[in-house]
Image (cartoon, coloured by chain):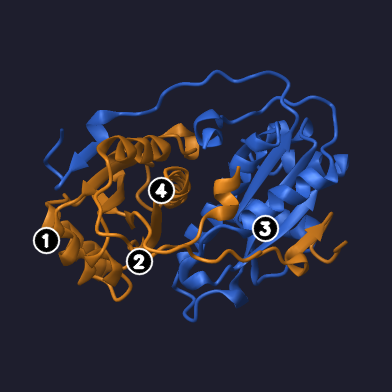
Chain colours: A blue, B orange
Amino acid sequence: MSAIFERRSVRKFLPKSVEPDRIERLLRAGFEAPSAHNRRPWEFIVITARKDLDAIAGMSPFAKMCTEAAAAIIPCANLNLGEAAPEDTWWVQDLAAATENILLQIVEEGLGGVWLGWYPDKGRIEALSARFGIPSHIVPFSVIALGYPAKSVPKADRFNASRVHYDAWDKQV
Amino acid sequence: MSAIFERRSVRKFLPKSVEPDRIERLLRAGFEAPSAHNRRPWEFIVITARKDLDAIAGMSPFAKMCTEAAAAIIPCANLNLGEAAPEDTWWVQDLAAATENILLQIVEEGLGGVWLGWYPDKGRIEALSARFGIPSHIVPFSVIALGYPAKSVPKADRFNASRVHYDAWDKQV
């Protein structure tokens, strides 16, 4: 799956909107992620209005590129669909897997995107929830800024043999 | 990227080992995951010895299929490579993304696999750390059991339009 090896964070976008059918395939990719006990505790919010994207850009020191992005997808956790016990946080892993699926499908669609960390930053969560009317049992987990890339981002091989261990922690090949 | 849409949890495996070059490509896929501030806080342990896989099967109520699996990959967080503050847990998301990349590459390789939740279950973490000599600053995050699938697992479309919201939480198309 070349998308895994081609994916890079893209933060510069062309002033060009993304077709609705591409957005839908991105969402479909998110829905296909694995989840603990197959609970699928996710919801997705799609933002395309310029003023909303500009507002998101001001909610995190790392979200500036939203002023250029054509769209943002916000994977959220619905805590009513999740664990029995509130201290259980397997849903964090579920939402991260859904986010990664969307990022990979972005590559497949010829688009570019970047994963903006949101949860567990309380300030970012509150700002986003206030603007988009997100109720308290819904946690905006990440923001994926996306669009047609303005330039290609160079690839780098990130394999690091010193981080690979065979048979036990202290053995390497 | 068809692997996203073809991936299913596979828990039945043929008694056939997995070639080392395939294992290496799985690891390479893990290394290519995005991470917060590009910290790449991961390490990977590869387990292929039958007795070790059988031992893992006994460490979680959901790990029985390890007695059939040809291998297990254990993505771990190296806390010394991560955040400055111990209460920061962005690494959980990084490790989940790496786990998902490996699961997708498993599909690409014609293999099958399943994501076994490990972190934050203390008992599972302690059992695995004790057996494989994993030091305290390394957190075994998940266990991916894998091998050649014994049967194909039926696909299901998981798209759910009621979980998609446009422009704001309370709007749907």
Task: Tell me if residue A21 can be seen.
Answer: yes
Name the residue: 87% across, 44% down.
A49
Q: Mark 4 lies on which chain?
A: B
Name the residue: 84% across, 40% down.
A19
Amino acid on which disc 2 is placed? Lys
Name the residue: 81% across, 46% down.
A21
- Distance of label 4 from label 1 (alpha carbons): 26 Å
Amino acid on which disc 1 is placed? Lys
- Check disc 2 and report the residue beneath it: B12
Q: Nearer the viewer, mark 1 or mark 3?
A: 1
Circles 2 and 3 in contact, beta carbons < 8 Å: no
Query: Element at badge 4?
Result: helix
Circles 4 and 1 in contact, beta carbons < 8 Å: no
Q: Nearer the viewer, mark 2 or mark 3?
A: 2
- Which label sits on residue B95? 4
Establish if A3 lies above or below A82.
above
Task: Judge the density around disc 2: few (<14), some (14-19), many (≥20) Cα neighbours within 10 Å.
Answer: many
Query: Element at badge 2?
Result: loop
- Check disc 3 and report the residue beneath it: A126
